[in-house]
Image (cartoon, rainbow, N blue to C red):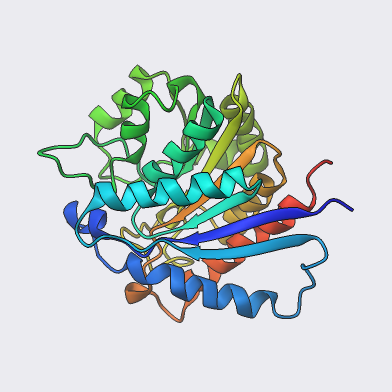
Amino acid sequence: MKRFYLRIISVPFDYGVKLINGRPGARFGPKKIIRDFYKLTRNIELKDIITIKYETVRPIAKNVKKTHQRVTKAVRKSIRSGEISIVIGGGHDISFGSGRAVFLESKKIGQINIDAHYDVRPVVNGKITSGTPFRRLLEAGFLNGENFVELGVHAPKNLKEHHDYVFQKKGVLLRLDYINKIGMKNALDKAFKIAARKTNATIFDVDIDSVQKRFAPGCSAPCTKGFTKKQILLAAFMAGRNNNIKLFNLMEVNPLYDVNNKTVELAAKLILSFIKGIIKREK
């Protein structure tokens, strides 16, 4: 039986959320998610199939760039050790640091972002906010737009200029209504193919605000519309099962605004679903 190696990297940092005038609190997400993940897996036998290591990146207060550098270093180390990485935030800006690591180790990368928002805002006056990660990856040349897929964008506050930017970069947008029409599985199959085309690794992101707030009220920017719990758990499983996925970024869980621990529990279940998918990978 093939053994898999996984590293779960916690990044308790949400200054990028504060800079965009979002609801701070996602810095408390990693610790609570790991706690619930322990509870979930207490009676599940995984040690014979998968080795899981844990690491926490210590952020530098109010310094987004230097914190991202630490994230990059941690993820590069994980990749070099032959591990699949899960990064738990924190604000979505963290995905620039982890994405840069995959690029530096793999050179050609694809990116799938499940999100209510585009997260391609420009950096203005040096402020690196939680809305900037994918623009930064694209502008740095780490990510080719033709391998960038946005799934589930629907929030009413999304700007047309961000939509236009994604298309200018030849990115692919699969809207929420389209995904609900063709089904999550078909949408993800399409996304995986696009992200994997002429690349060596794919990054899979879930911003928890992509999920309906009745299932995930504890996030930086909750939305009434979005994916169901069943849809997002399927997405995590399918990503885990996909051999090209080297990194799973799970972002924006905010326990300060959670209701009955719903969002934290869902995040822990997403990690478990991803791991169940990994175990099903082809040898």
Q: At 43% from the left edge and 47% from the top edge, which residue is drawn? A: 73
Up-down relation of residue 156 to residue 120 (above or below): below
Q: Nearer the viewer, residue 30 or 7?
A: 7
Q: Nearer the viewer, residue 190 or 105?
A: 105
Where's residue 47, x and y in %? Answer: 77, 68
Where's residue 68, x and y in %? Answer: 33, 48
Up-down relation of residue 277 to residue 134 (above or below): below
> Can you see residue 205?
no
Total marks placed: 0
On-image quarter of the C terminus: top right
Q: Nearer the viewer, residue 250 or 55?
A: 55
Image quarter of residue 58: bottom left
Image quarter of residue 169: top left
Where's residue 195, x and y in %? Answer: 57, 28
Q: Nearer the viewer, residue 179 or 165?
A: 165
199 relative position to 279: left or right: left
Where's residue 214, x and y in %? Answer: 45, 67
> Can you see residue 108?
yes
Q: At 81% from the left edge and 60% from the top edge, which residue is drawn? A: 49
